[in-house]
Image: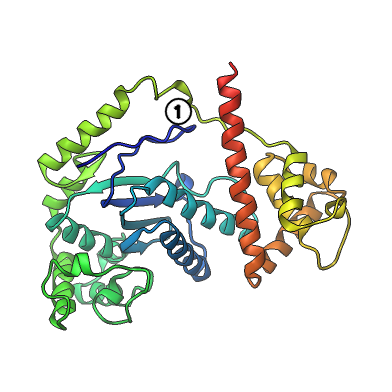
Amino acid sequence: MLYIRHICRMARKLRVEFPGAIYHVMLRGNWRHNIFKSDEDRKRFLKRLKKSADTYNTRIYFFCLMKNHAHLVVETPESNISRFMQSFTTGYTVYYNIRHNQAGHLFQGRFKAKLVDGDSYLLALSRYVHLNPVFTDSAKQLTLKERVKILREYRWSSYRSYIGITKSLDFVDYSPTLGLTGNIKTKDTAKNYRRFVEAGIAENDDDFINIMTSSRHSIGSDEFTKTVDKLYQKLIEKKSILEDVSFRNVITPIPAKDIIDITCTAMGAKDGDVYRRQRDNMIRPVAAYMLCKFAGMTQREVATILNLNGGSAVSLQLKKLNEQLSRDKQLTKLTDEITSILISKRLMTGNEETHSH
C-alpha cells in the first residue's frame, strides 16, 4: 500500500514516497547550461551516483548522461528519494563548482521525479532514456546505420552494458528491465533488448511519449496516474503542514565566524591557522570555498576575512583546492562532510528565522 511522506523545507517540492517506488529522475543544468564539461566530470557524476546509491540503499536501473541534462531511473526500497537525491546532487555540485571555479546552483531547481508504473512502462522508459543520444538535432540528420553506430558507441549511458558491448556496471541493477525481455540467464536476453531499443530509432513511440507527458507526477496506466495524482492532492490539502515557508526560496547566509569554526574543527586545525600562509595546509583553500558558498561573499570579501591579497589570491586558493581534491580522497571526504554540516545549519537557521516571525 502506498503511503505519503512530506518533507517540509524551504523551496522543496512535494514528493510521494513509498517502499519500492520507481522514479524517472531528470536533472537539467541551471538556465540549461551544461552540467558536464569533460569526461572527468561524467566519471565523477557516476562515482557520486554509486556512492549515494550504496549509502541510501537505492537501486539504479539505467541512466543516460547528456551535455546539459541527465536521466536516471531508480528504485527506493526505503522510500527515501529526497534524501538520496540531496546527497547525490550536493556531492556532485560541490565537486563541479570547485573544479570549474564557480559558485551557486548547478541544477535547474530541484530534481524532476515521476513515479513509474512497472512492467511494460519500465521497458518502454528504458528505451526512451537509452535513445537520448540519437535524438539530438545533429543525430536526427544522419542515416539509420549512422545513428545505430552512435548509440552503440555512446559511453555515457548504461546501454552498452545492457547489450553486452561492455561488462556490467556494479552499481546498475539489470534484472528488472531485462527480465521483461526474456530469461535474463540466457545470451538471447541482451540481443532481444538490443533489438527492442534500436527498433525505436526508426519509428518514434508516440503513444509512450504521450503517456510520459500526460501527467506531471507519473508515467503509467490511467489507473496508476489517477492514484498518484490523488496522493499529491492529499499533500496539497494538508495546509497545517504546508506552511508558507515551503514555497519561499530563501537562502540564509551563515555567519563567516561559524563557517570558519566548523571548517577548522572538521579539519583539526589550530586557532589562527586559517589566517596564516602554510604551504601544505589546506585549511585556507577549504575555508575560502565554504565562505564563498555559504556566507554569500565575493572573493574580494573572502580575501579580507582570510588576510589574503585580493580576490585573485582567493581564486588561486580555490584552484589549489581543486587540484588537491583530484588526488586526495581524505580531503574530498572532509570537504563533503563540512558541506553537509553547513547545509544542515543553513536549513535550521532558515527555519528558526521563519518561525520567529
Q: Which residue is mark 1?
A: 246
The N terminus, quarter of image: top left
Residue at the image point whose x is 10% and y is 73% from the top: 182
Residue 346 falls left or right of residue 232: right
Reply above or below: 236 against 225: above
Instruction: Identify the residue at image location x=38%, y=59%.
Output: 57
Examine the rendered structure and indicate whether residue 181 appears above or below residue 7.
below
SS state under label 1:
helix
Return the residue nearer the eye: 226 or 292.
226
Query: Would you place residue 254 above or below residue 29 in this image?
Result: above
Q: Position of residue 345 (x, y in %)?
A: 62, 39
> Residue lying farthest top?
357
- Residue 213 appears in which quarter of the rendering? top left
- Residue at 27% across, 77% down: 149
Q: Amino acid at mark 1?
A: Ser
Judged left or right of residue 244, residue 26 is left
Query: Where is the C terminus found, in terms of image quarters?
Result: top right
Task: Write down the quadrant of residue 156 in the picture.
Answer: bottom left
Q: Count residues near mark 1 (Cα–Cα under 10 Å), then give few for <14, some for 14-19, many for 20+.
A: some
Residue closer to the observer: 191 or 141:
191
Question: How many discs mark residues in the rendered view?
Answer: 1
106 horizontally vs 140: left or right: right
Scheme of image coloration: rainbow
Q: Residue 71 appears at what percent x and percent y? A: 34, 57
Horizontal and vertical percent position of residue 85: 43, 50
Give the residue at x 72% y 44%: 259
Does residue 85 lie above or below 240 as drawn? below
Locate residue 132 relative to residue 286 in the image: left or right: left
The image position of residue 338, as x and y in percent, is 65, 51
Quadrant location of residue 279? bottom right
